[in-house]
Image: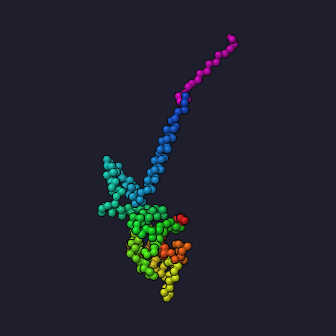
Protein backbone atom coordinates (compact mmCIF):
# COMPACT_ATOMS: atom_id res chain seq x y z
CA UNK A 1 0.00 0.00 0.00
CA UNK A 2 2.88 2.28 0.69
CA UNK A 3 4.05 1.96 -2.96
CA UNK A 4 0.68 2.88 -4.46
CA UNK A 5 0.37 6.30 -6.09
CA UNK A 6 -2.79 8.22 -5.71
CA UNK A 7 -3.82 9.97 -8.96
CA UNK A 8 -6.32 12.78 -8.74
CA UNK A 9 -8.07 13.93 -11.98
CA UNK A 10 -9.50 17.41 -12.12
CA UNK A 11 -12.17 17.94 -14.74
CA UNK A 12 -12.84 21.52 -15.76
CA UNK A 13 -16.47 21.96 -16.55
CA UNK A 14 -16.95 24.37 -19.42
CA UNK A 15 -19.98 26.56 -19.75
CA UNK A 16 -22.47 25.13 -22.24
CA UNK A 17 -21.27 21.54 -22.05
CA UNK A 18 -24.31 20.46 -20.12
CA UNK A 19 -26.40 20.90 -23.26
CA UNK A 20 -25.54 22.24 -26.67
CA UNK A 21 -28.59 24.52 -26.52
CA UNK A 22 -30.68 25.93 -29.35
CA UNK A 23 -28.97 29.25 -30.10
CA UNK A 24 -28.17 28.09 -33.64
CA UNK A 25 -31.87 27.51 -34.23
CA UNK A 26 -32.61 31.13 -33.42
CA UNK A 27 -29.97 32.33 -35.87
CA UNK A 28 -31.27 29.97 -38.55
CA UNK A 29 -34.85 31.14 -38.01
CA UNK A 30 -33.74 34.78 -38.38
CA UNK A 31 -31.98 33.89 -41.63
CA UNK A 32 -35.03 32.10 -43.06
CA UNK A 33 -37.28 35.01 -42.07
CA UNK A 34 -34.98 37.50 -43.76
CA UNK A 35 -34.90 35.39 -46.95
CA UNK A 36 -38.69 35.12 -46.94
CA UNK A 37 -38.99 38.90 -46.61
CA UNK A 38 -36.48 39.39 -49.43
CA UNK A 39 -38.34 37.12 -51.86
CA UNK A 40 -41.65 38.69 -50.87
CA UNK A 41 -40.16 42.08 -51.73
CA UNK A 42 -39.01 40.79 -55.13
CA UNK A 43 -42.49 39.43 -55.80
CA UNK A 44 -44.15 42.72 -54.87
CA UNK A 45 -41.77 44.64 -57.15
CA UNK A 46 -42.72 42.48 -60.12
CA UNK A 47 -46.42 43.04 -59.47
CA UNK A 48 -46.42 46.82 -59.90
CA UNK A 49 -46.39 48.59 -63.25
CA UNK A 50 -42.97 49.48 -64.72
CA UNK A 51 -43.66 53.24 -64.65
CA UNK A 52 -44.65 53.16 -60.96
CA UNK A 53 -41.55 51.12 -60.20
CA UNK A 54 -39.46 53.71 -62.00
CA UNK A 55 -41.10 56.55 -60.04
CA UNK A 56 -40.38 54.84 -56.73
CA UNK A 57 -36.76 54.29 -57.78
CA UNK A 58 -36.50 57.94 -58.83
CA UNK A 59 -37.89 59.11 -55.47
CA UNK A 60 -35.25 57.24 -53.46
CA UNK A 61 -32.51 58.09 -55.95
CA UNK A 62 -33.08 61.83 -55.44
CA UNK A 63 -33.98 61.68 -51.74
CA UNK A 64 -31.73 63.71 -49.46
CA UNK A 65 -31.74 63.35 -45.69
CA UNK A 66 -30.58 66.97 -45.39
CA UNK A 67 -33.50 68.45 -47.34
CA UNK A 68 -36.15 65.86 -46.46
CA UNK A 69 -35.26 65.39 -42.77
CA UNK A 70 -38.34 65.07 -40.60
CA UNK A 71 -40.67 64.46 -43.57
CA UNK A 72 -42.46 61.19 -44.13
CA UNK A 73 -42.54 59.40 -47.48
CA UNK A 74 -46.29 59.03 -46.94
CA UNK A 75 -46.69 62.77 -47.55
CA UNK A 76 -45.42 62.23 -51.07
CA UNK A 77 -46.98 58.84 -51.68
CA UNK A 78 -49.70 60.31 -53.88
CA UNK A 79 -47.06 61.88 -56.12
CA UNK A 80 -45.17 58.61 -56.31
CA UNK A 81 -48.08 56.31 -57.10
CA UNK A 82 -50.77 58.49 -58.69
CA UNK A 83 -51.00 60.26 -62.02
CA UNK A 84 -53.61 63.01 -61.81
CA UNK A 85 -53.46 66.67 -62.58
CA UNK A 86 -51.00 68.76 -64.59
CA UNK A 87 -48.04 68.09 -62.30
CA UNK A 88 -48.65 64.35 -62.42
CA UNK A 89 -48.83 64.47 -66.24
CA UNK A 90 -45.45 66.20 -66.35
CA UNK A 91 -44.07 63.63 -63.92
CA UNK A 92 -45.44 60.78 -66.03
CA UNK A 93 -43.86 62.20 -69.18
CA UNK A 94 -40.54 62.73 -67.44
CA UNK A 95 -40.55 59.23 -65.99
CA UNK A 96 -41.49 57.78 -69.38
CA UNK A 97 -38.49 59.53 -70.91
CA UNK A 98 -36.21 58.17 -68.21
CA UNK A 99 -37.68 54.69 -68.43
CA UNK A 100 -37.41 54.61 -72.23
CA UNK A 101 -33.82 55.77 -71.95
CA UNK A 102 -33.00 53.10 -69.36
CA UNK A 103 -34.73 50.50 -71.56
CA UNK A 104 -32.42 51.30 -74.47
CA UNK A 105 -29.98 48.58 -73.40
CA UNK A 106 -32.55 46.14 -72.04
CA UNK A 107 -35.00 44.34 -74.36
CA UNK A 108 -36.86 42.97 -71.34
CA UNK A 109 -37.49 46.44 -69.87
CA UNK A 110 -38.56 47.76 -73.29
CA UNK A 111 -40.97 44.85 -73.69
CA UNK A 112 -42.44 45.50 -70.21
CA UNK A 113 -42.90 49.20 -70.89
CA UNK A 114 -44.65 48.60 -74.21
CA UNK A 115 -46.97 45.92 -72.82
CA UNK A 116 -47.90 48.20 -69.92
CA UNK A 117 -48.69 51.13 -72.22
CA UNK A 118 -50.74 48.93 -74.55
CA UNK A 119 -52.74 47.57 -71.61
CA UNK A 120 -53.24 51.08 -70.25
CA UNK A 121 -53.98 53.05 -73.43
CA UNK A 122 -55.03 50.48 -76.06
CA UNK A 123 -57.03 47.99 -74.04
CA UNK A 124 -59.85 47.80 -76.60
CA UNK A 125 -57.48 46.71 -79.39
CA UNK A 126 -54.82 44.90 -77.35
CA UNK A 127 -55.75 41.58 -78.99
CA UNK A 128 -54.49 43.05 -82.29
CA UNK A 129 -51.08 44.01 -80.88
CA UNK A 130 -48.36 41.52 -80.03
CA UNK A 131 -45.07 42.46 -78.33
CA UNK A 132 -42.24 39.94 -78.13
CA UNK A 133 -38.46 39.71 -78.02
CA UNK A 134 -36.85 38.31 -81.14
CA UNK A 135 -33.28 37.82 -82.25
CA UNK A 136 -32.26 41.41 -82.86
CA UNK A 137 -34.75 43.43 -80.88
CA UNK A 138 -38.25 43.98 -79.51
CA UNK A 139 -40.98 43.49 -82.10
CA UNK A 140 -44.41 45.15 -82.02
CA UNK A 141 -46.85 43.55 -84.46
CA UNK A 142 -50.06 45.38 -85.40
CA UNK A 143 -52.44 42.86 -86.91
CA UNK A 144 -55.72 42.89 -88.77
CA UNK A 145 -58.78 41.27 -87.26
CA UNK A 146 -61.89 40.07 -89.02
CA UNK A 147 -64.09 43.14 -89.33
CA UNK A 148 -61.37 45.41 -87.91
CA UNK A 149 -58.56 46.05 -90.42
CA UNK A 150 -55.59 48.32 -89.86
CA UNK A 151 -55.65 49.57 -93.47
CA UNK A 152 -58.42 50.10 -95.97
CA UNK A 153 -58.91 47.04 -98.19
CA UNK A 154 -56.29 46.89 -100.94
CA UNK A 155 -54.92 50.28 -99.85
CA UNK A 156 -52.11 51.79 -97.82
CA UNK A 157 -54.48 54.23 -96.10
CA UNK A 158 -54.37 53.53 -92.33
CA UNK A 159 -57.61 53.28 -90.40
CA UNK A 160 -58.25 55.41 -87.27
CA UNK A 161 -57.36 52.39 -85.12
CA UNK A 162 -53.99 52.04 -86.86
CA UNK A 163 -53.27 55.73 -86.37
CA UNK A 164 -54.12 55.54 -82.67
CA UNK A 165 -51.94 52.46 -82.14
CA UNK A 166 -48.99 53.97 -83.99
CA UNK A 167 -49.33 57.23 -82.04
CA UNK A 168 -48.96 55.33 -78.73
CA UNK A 169 -46.05 53.24 -80.03
CA UNK A 170 -44.34 56.28 -81.53
CA UNK A 171 -44.71 58.19 -78.28
CA UNK A 172 -43.31 55.25 -76.31
CA UNK A 173 -40.17 54.60 -78.37
CA UNK A 174 -39.28 58.11 -79.47
CA UNK A 175 -37.18 58.80 -76.35
CA UNK A 176 -35.02 55.70 -76.74
CA UNK A 177 -31.91 55.99 -78.96
CA UNK A 178 -32.35 52.58 -80.62
CA UNK A 179 -32.69 52.22 -84.37
CA UNK A 180 -36.05 51.04 -85.68
CA UNK A 181 -37.05 48.73 -88.53
CA UNK A 182 -40.53 48.65 -90.09
CA UNK A 183 -41.93 45.70 -92.02
CA UNK A 184 -45.15 45.19 -93.94
CA UNK A 185 -46.88 41.83 -94.47
CA UNK A 186 -49.98 40.63 -96.31
CA UNK A 187 -51.95 37.39 -96.36
CA UNK A 188 -51.67 34.88 -99.20
CA UNK A 189 -54.75 36.11 -101.06
CA UNK A 190 -53.46 37.07 -104.52
CA UNK A 191 -53.71 40.78 -105.15
CA UNK A 192 -52.92 41.90 -108.65
CA UNK A 193 -53.93 45.27 -110.05
CA UNK A 194 -51.98 45.60 -113.24
CA UNK A 195 -48.35 45.45 -112.17
CA UNK A 196 -49.33 46.17 -108.55
CA UNK A 197 -49.02 43.10 -106.28
CA UNK A 198 -48.84 42.12 -102.60
CA UNK A 199 -45.17 43.13 -102.67
CA UNK A 200 -46.12 46.71 -103.53
CA UNK A 201 -49.00 46.73 -101.04
CA UNK A 202 -46.91 45.47 -98.11
CA UNK A 203 -44.12 47.93 -98.90
CA UNK A 204 -46.47 50.92 -99.20
CA UNK A 205 -48.15 50.03 -95.90
CA UNK A 206 -44.74 49.87 -94.21
CA UNK A 207 -43.92 53.29 -95.67
CA UNK A 208 -47.26 54.66 -94.45
CA UNK A 209 -46.43 53.38 -90.94
CA UNK A 210 -43.02 55.05 -91.17
CA UNK A 211 -44.62 58.39 -92.04
CA UNK A 212 -47.05 58.16 -89.12
CA UNK A 213 -44.34 57.23 -86.61
CA UNK A 214 -42.29 60.28 -87.64
CA UNK A 215 -45.39 62.47 -87.29
CA UNK A 216 -45.82 61.10 -83.76
CA UNK A 217 -42.28 62.05 -82.74
CA UNK A 218 -39.92 59.30 -83.94
CA UNK A 219 -36.70 60.77 -85.36
CA UNK A 220 -36.54 59.75 -89.07
CA UNK A 221 -32.78 59.24 -88.79
CA UNK A 222 -33.39 56.34 -86.39
CA UNK A 223 -35.32 54.35 -88.99
CA UNK A 224 -32.77 51.96 -90.49
CA UNK A 225 -34.99 49.75 -92.64
CA UNK A 226 -38.42 49.80 -94.26
CA UNK A 227 -39.40 46.66 -96.16
CA UNK A 228 -42.38 44.77 -97.54
CA UNK A 229 -42.47 40.98 -97.46
CA UNK A 230 -45.85 40.33 -99.11
CA UNK A 231 -47.12 36.92 -97.91
CA UNK A 232 -43.69 35.27 -97.58
CA UNK A 233 -43.46 35.50 -93.74
CA UNK A 234 -46.91 34.54 -92.39
CA UNK A 235 -47.68 34.92 -88.71
CA UNK A 236 -50.21 32.08 -88.80
CA UNK A 237 -48.41 29.52 -90.93
CA UNK A 238 -51.22 26.95 -90.80
CA UNK A 239 -53.67 29.39 -92.37
CA UNK A 240 -52.05 31.72 -94.96
CA UNK A 241 -55.39 33.53 -95.39
CA UNK A 242 -55.80 34.35 -91.70
CA UNK A 243 -56.35 38.14 -91.30
CA UNK A 244 -53.61 38.29 -88.65
CA UNK A 245 -51.09 37.69 -91.42
CA UNK A 246 -51.91 41.18 -92.65
CA UNK A 247 -49.79 43.20 -90.27
CA UNK A 248 -47.16 45.85 -89.67
CA UNK A 249 -44.09 45.00 -87.59
CA UNK A 250 -42.20 47.76 -85.77
CA UNK A 251 -38.88 46.41 -84.45
CA UNK A 252 -36.83 48.31 -81.86
CA UNK A 253 -33.32 47.07 -82.61
CA UNK A 254 -30.82 45.99 -79.96
CA UNK A 255 -27.22 44.91 -80.46
CA UNK A 256 -27.85 41.85 -78.33
CA UNK A 257 -31.29 40.34 -77.97
CA UNK A 258 -32.37 36.81 -77.18
CA UNK A 259 -34.99 35.08 -79.29
CA UNK A 260 -38.08 33.96 -77.36
CA UNK A 261 -39.92 31.01 -78.84
Instruction: Give above or below for 203 relative to 259.
Output: below
- Tell me the residue at 40%/66% (across/down): 123
Residue 51 visible (yes or no): yes
State which quadrant residue 59 falls in: bottom left
Query: How far across and how far down the image is residue 258, in percent?
Result: 53, 64
Does 183 appear above or below 260?
Answer: below
In the picture, the quarter occupied by the N terminus is top right
**For the point 53% across and 67% down, which residue is it?**
135
* Residue 150 screen position, x and y as percent: 43, 75
Between residue 140 and residue 96, name the one nearer to us. Answer: 140
Residue 227, can we see it?
no
- Residue 7, picture quadrant: top right
- Residue at the (43%, 53%) spot, across then down: 44
Q: Does residue 12 belong to the magenta stretch?
A: yes
| Quadrant position of residue 55 | bottom left
State whether the magenta stretch is mostly helix, strand or loop. Answer: loop
Left or right: where does residue 34 sit relative to residue 82?
right
Q: Nearer the viewer, residue 233 or 124?
A: 124
Q: Quadrant of the C terminus?
A: bottom right
Coloration of the structure image: rainbow
Q: Nearer the viewer, residue 37 or 222?
A: 37
Give coordinates of residue 117: x percent, y percent. 41, 65
Please state the total of marks drawn on the protein image: 0
Find residue 190 and report its horizontal and vertical position in percent.
52, 82
Residue beneath the point at 45% across and 75% down: 146
In the rendered image, the residue lying farthest to the left is: 86
Farthest-out residue, top: 2
In magenta stretch: residue 244: no
Give the magenta range.
Answer: 1-17
104 versus 197 height, above or below: above
The residue lying toward the viewer, choosing from 91 and 220, is 91
Task: Specify the farthest residue to the bottom.
Answer: 194
Amino acid sequence: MKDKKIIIKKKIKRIGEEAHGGSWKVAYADFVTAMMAFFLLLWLITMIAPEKRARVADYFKNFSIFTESGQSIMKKSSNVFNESGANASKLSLEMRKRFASSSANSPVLMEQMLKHLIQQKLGDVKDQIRVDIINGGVRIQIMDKKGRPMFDTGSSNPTPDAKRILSVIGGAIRHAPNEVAIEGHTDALPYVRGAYTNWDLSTERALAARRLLTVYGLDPSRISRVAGYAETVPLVKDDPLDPRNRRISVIVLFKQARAYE
